[in-house]
Amino acid sequence: MEWLLTPGPVRLHPKAQEALARPQLHHRTEPARALFLKARALLREAFGTEGEVLILTGSGTLAMEALVLNLFAPGERVLVPVYGKFSERFAEIAQAHGLAVERLDYPYGAVPRPEDVAREGFRGLLLVHSETSTGALVDLPALARAFKAANPEGLVGADMVTSLLVRPVALEAFGVDAAVSGSQKGLMCPPGLGFVALSPRALEALRPRGYYLDLSRERKAQGEGESAWTPAIGLVGAVAAVLEEVMPHLEAHLALKAWQNDLLYGVGEELGLKAVPAVRSPAVAAFYLPEGVPYRAVKEAFAQRGAVIAGGQGPLKGRIFRLSLMGHYDRYEALGVAALFKEAFADILPAS
Ligand SMILES: *Cc1c(COP(=O)(O)O)cnc(C)c1O
């Protein structure tokens, strides 16, 4: 048995595995349409929006690109705080689509403050809620509020890839107009689906754009329980099955995820490890490597115990390691992982 401790893909939910074992559905049949509509309704509830959620076949990055392409026009000014690999990606996508990008650069691990984004003259603000590359969590409602006080017509786009089903989210209540996620993180399904949640305000701002990524065309098709092109319908079934199981107990699920991540940080503290993020996301625990210990040694100590972990990205490559219990872990399995973490470090840092 392998312990997947990476922040995506994650250990699958048993309901996802069960759904994936079912026979193939044709996507333009009644059972498929019913499944698609069920997944959309549950996702709408999970994102906390009165608007709509569109399901796209592709990874989370595709959903980020669809959001940027469909809500903003070339030349429009967008503000993009960069504090990790995924916020960097948001800036790069906006640049690739010809937007006038104003970057606000932070050291990896830090988070932007509301006063930093209270700047006039912008059509949009792009933020990553849970910066998986550093383990940092930003105060989305406070940032959205500060931005909109300066730009009442502006739109806030948020990456909720590792906050959906990991900590409370709600689009309109947060002042967020559009948000994205993917199937392989908090949803505990395999990779392959991206989601774009659009508030009523974002739905109004939608203009036809592109081809495969045209959300206006998708919206029309998905209203009928279909999608414009062939969807990964098997994964849609897995997502519906997991949400059907988790949503009625969402609060308990989020409390478990928070407790589990605190447990990992607690072990790290005991071992004298320094945490990376200024503010901690419950999606992942990120630690600096101890002086003189290469990432390879940490990875190997976990691998010997059947666990797969993640290293650093961008400027943090070779400087940190990351552990995540975002996947399907119960309380006792998490305690087992905590014990494994201690054991691995007993090998890495023999008592002197
Ligand atoms: C995983 C992740 C993504 C999407 O990455 P894909 O590999 O394209 O699925 C985007 N943002 C964050 C914060 C992530 O953790």
Image: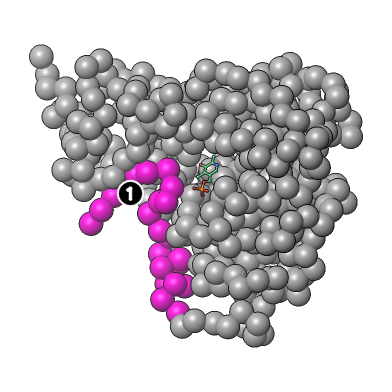
**Which of the 4 quarters of the picture holds residue 106?**
top right
Question: Compared with residue 27, is residue 308 higher up or lower down, i.e. above or below?
Answer: above
Q: Nearer the viewer, residue 317 or 137?
A: 317
Question: Compared with residue 36, is residue 251 higher up or lower down, i.e. above or below?
Answer: above
Q: Quadrant of the C terminus?
A: top left
The residue lying at 47 percent from left, 73 percent from top is: 19
Q: Residue 80, percent across and down?
A: 68, 28
Q: Residue 30, percent across and down?
A: 66, 85
- How was this image coloured? one colour
Q: Is residue 10 magenta?
A: yes
The amino acid at mark 1 is: Leu
Q: Quadrant of the N terminus?
A: bottom left
Q: Residue 325, percent across and down?
A: 39, 44
The residue lying at 63 percent from left, 55 percent from top is: 195
Q: Residue 333, percent across and down?
A: 31, 48
**Does the beta carbon of the residue at mark 1 sit less than 8 Å from ligand 1?**
no
Region in magenta: 1-22
Q: Is residue 332 magenta?
A: no
